Every structure is written in C-alpha cells, then in structure tokens.
Image (tube, grey):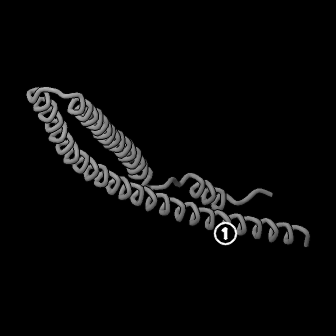
Amino acid sequence: MSPGPGATAALNAVAGREFSLRVVQERAQFREQEAGRVVGQAAARLAEARQKSETLLVYREQYVQRMMQTAESGVDAGSLRELLAFIARIDDALSQQDIEIARREEHWRSMVAQWNERVLELRTYDTLEQRHLDRLAGIERRLEQKLTDEWAARRRSGDE
C-alpha cells in the first residue's frame, strides 16, 4: 500500500524546503574568507616591517663595530664624524621603523577583530541552518510515522 496523496505531498514539501537564509549565509562565508585573507596580508606586512627593523639593527651594529675598529687604529676626526653621522641616520631610520611597526601592529589587530566578527556572524548563520535542518528532520520523522501508522491501519482494516 502506498501513502495517501496528502501525505506524499507533505513529504515532498518538507524535502524541498531549503534554508531561506542560504544566500545571506554564503555572503557571510565570503566575507569571513575575505577578512581572513586581509588578516594574512596585514600579518605579512607586519613581518616585513619587523624584518626591516632587524636588518637596520644589524647594519647599526656593523657600523658601530667598524667605528670602534677605526677609532682604535687611529683615524682622522672627519672619518669618525662621518661614521657617527651615518649611525645617527640608522638610528633615525630605526625610530621611524618602530613607528611603522606600531602602525602595522594596530592595523593587524584591527583586521583580526574584524575577522573574528565575520567568524561569529558565519557561525550564527550556520547555527540557524542547523536548527532549520533539525526542524525539517523532526517534521519528516513525524510525517513518516504518520505514513507508517496510516499504512498499518489500512493493512489492519484490510485484514479484518
């Protein structure tokens, strides 16, 4: 025995129901992925700035050592002043680089915060979708039980 036409239509209606916020959920997923990409770019720029600072520190140390060696070997005052002036320029560059690192760290933190917001937004839609699926599964179980009950009732009435 097959289920009645009303029960079949009800099962088909449940099976065909799609999550109504699917488009919004997909947009949230895109935004979360884009925010993650931006965080990666910000982290890379921050790492570049830190590497530049490390390079400047190495240069500075090399020139300080060079100045010490030059001073020990007896050098004229003009050469010593030039080395000191160059080290001062490196110190200025290091100061500027520290400012740049701080700026890039702040940008990175801001991008991480935005990414976290996007992750939470996406989780919200995922939770809503799961609730929707759970509701549909419950409806489907009840309809299947109804069909089973109807089938059993028809069979009993046919046996009698």
Residue 153 at what x, y percent from top left?
80, 71
Q: Is residue 131 left or right of residue 4?
A: left
90 vs 129, left or right, is: left
Q: Quadrant of residue 77?
A: top left
Vertical arrangement, residue 22 with respect to residue 44, above or below: below
Question: Could you tell me which residue is drawn at 24 percent across and 50 percent down?
Answer: 102
To which residue does mark 1 refer? 142
Is 106 or 26 nearer to us in this picture? 106
Q: Is residue 148 above or below residue 25?
A: below
Farthest left residue in view: 78
Q: Amino acid at mark 1?
A: Arg
Q: Residue, x 29% and y 37% (percent of image)?
A: 61
Residue at horizontal 73%, vertical 59%?
Answer: 3
Q: Is residue 88 left or right of residue 47?
A: left
Give whichever of 88, 152 is nearer the camera. Answer: 88
The C terminus appears in which quarter of the rendering?
bottom right
Element at label 1: helix
Camera-side residue of 137 and 128: 128
Total marks shown come to 1
Q: 123 above or below 157? A: above
| Badge 1: residue crowd in 10 Å (few <14, some 14–19, many ≥20) | few
Rendered residue at 19%/28% (across/down): 74
In the rendered view of the protein, which quadrant contains the N terminus? Answer: bottom right
Q: In the figure, is residue 76 to the left or right of 32?
A: left
Q: Say which quarter of the image contains residue 49.
A: top left
Tell me where residue 107 appears, x and y as whole percent. Answer: 26, 49
| Residue 148 location (% of width, % of height) | 77, 66
